[in-house]
């Protein structure tokens, strides 16, 4: 089916980037950084998880994949528009949280959760038909928050540090509140987590 969805002014992936897609990138580019959970499996995705979202990738890894794919990461504003449309809804499907519509902490009934194949929760799509924007994995965006520190010479100058980056959408370990279309997480760009993945976007010509 159609893999990207047109939203006013840009297109965005219908699904989170999967282990299968990321493996093609790693093999085509000989990318040096292999996701942690592949390393116990001969540097391949765990068996049966080819269509699960890629995780244990940093912001830099995600940007490298997007560039290889001829795309980019979505900005925070683009991500939010794709997740909730224009009516201010709190979740991709409406105003009320529904544990049956997203892979979140509640849907595991208190037991330890994990990622699921992308598109598993058909009832949880956004107004644009985009999947898993409230659960499964949190997603890197292109939006940076600049950081500055005082220089040591005491002259009042400032030195720019590594930016922080905005991550959007809940994941399998998030609760309903943290999975809303308004929820945002600020994190270091080099973090590699089992709860964070991404999807790609591209500007329309």
Image (cartoon, rainbow, N blue to C red):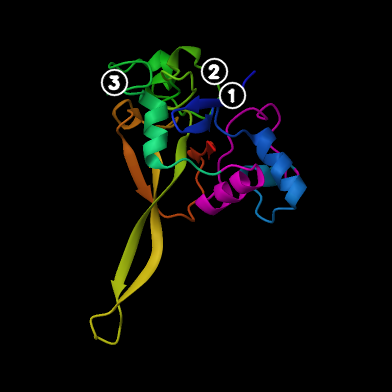
Q: Disc number at residue 117?
A: 1
Neighbour tally class for label 1: few under 14, some 14-19, many 20 plus, Cα within 10 Å: some
Decide which of tag 2 and tag 3 comes sooner along the chain.
3
Residue 161 in percent (x, y) is at 38, 67
Above or below, comparing residue 35 to residue 164 in the picture = above
Whether 52 is among the magenta residues is yes
Q: Is residue 129 magenta?
A: no
Answer whether labels 2 and 3 touch (C-beta < 8 Å).
no
Image quarter of residue 205: top right
Measure the C-alpha gap from mark 2 to mark 3: 25 Å
Measuring 56% from the left and 49% from the top, which residue is drawn there?
Answer: 63
Q: Residue at x 38, y 41 (%)?
A: 76
Q: Which mark is residue 120?
A: 2
- Check if mark 1's residue and mark 2's residue have beta carbons within 8 Å: yes
Residue 14 visible here = no
Task: Determine which residue is flagged by label 3.
Answer: 87
Mark-to-mark CA distance, 1 and 3: 28 Å
Question: To which quarter of the image does residue 154 belong?
Answer: bottom left
On screen, residue 196 above or below 13: below
Which SS does the magenta portion mostly show? loop
- Horizontal relation, residue 47 to residue 80: left or right: right
Taking the image as drawn, is residue 93 in sight? Answer: yes
Magenta stretch in the rendered image: 42-71
Q: Which residue shows up at 69% across the image and 56% down it?
A: 32
- Quarter where residue 181 is shown: top left
């Amino acid at each position: 089916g159609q893999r990207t969805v047109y939203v006013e002014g840009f297109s965005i992936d219908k699904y989170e980037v999967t282990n299968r897609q990321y493996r093609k990138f790693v093999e085509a580019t000989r990318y040096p950084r292999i996701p942690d959970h592949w390393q116990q499996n001969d540097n391949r995705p765990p068996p049966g998880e080819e269509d699960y979202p890629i995780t244990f990738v940093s912001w830099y890894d995600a940007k490298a994949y997007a560039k290889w794919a001829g795309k980019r990461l979505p900005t925070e504003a683009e991500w939010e528009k794709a997740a909730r449309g224009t009516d201010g809804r709190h979740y991709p499907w409406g105003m009320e949280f529904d544990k049956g519509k997203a892979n979140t902490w509640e849907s595991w009934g208190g037991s330890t959760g994990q990622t699921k194949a992308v598109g598993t929760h058909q009832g949880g799509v956004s107004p644009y038909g985009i999947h898993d924007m409230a659960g499964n994995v949190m997603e890197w965006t292109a939006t940076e928050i600049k950081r500055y520190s005082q220089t040591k010479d005491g002259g009042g100058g400032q030195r720019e540090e590594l930016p922080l980056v905005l991550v959007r959408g809940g994941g399998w370990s998030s609760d309903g509140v943290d999975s809303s279309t308004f929820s945002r997480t600020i994190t270091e760009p080099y973090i590699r987590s089992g709860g964070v993945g991404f999807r790609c976007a591209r500007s329309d010509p």
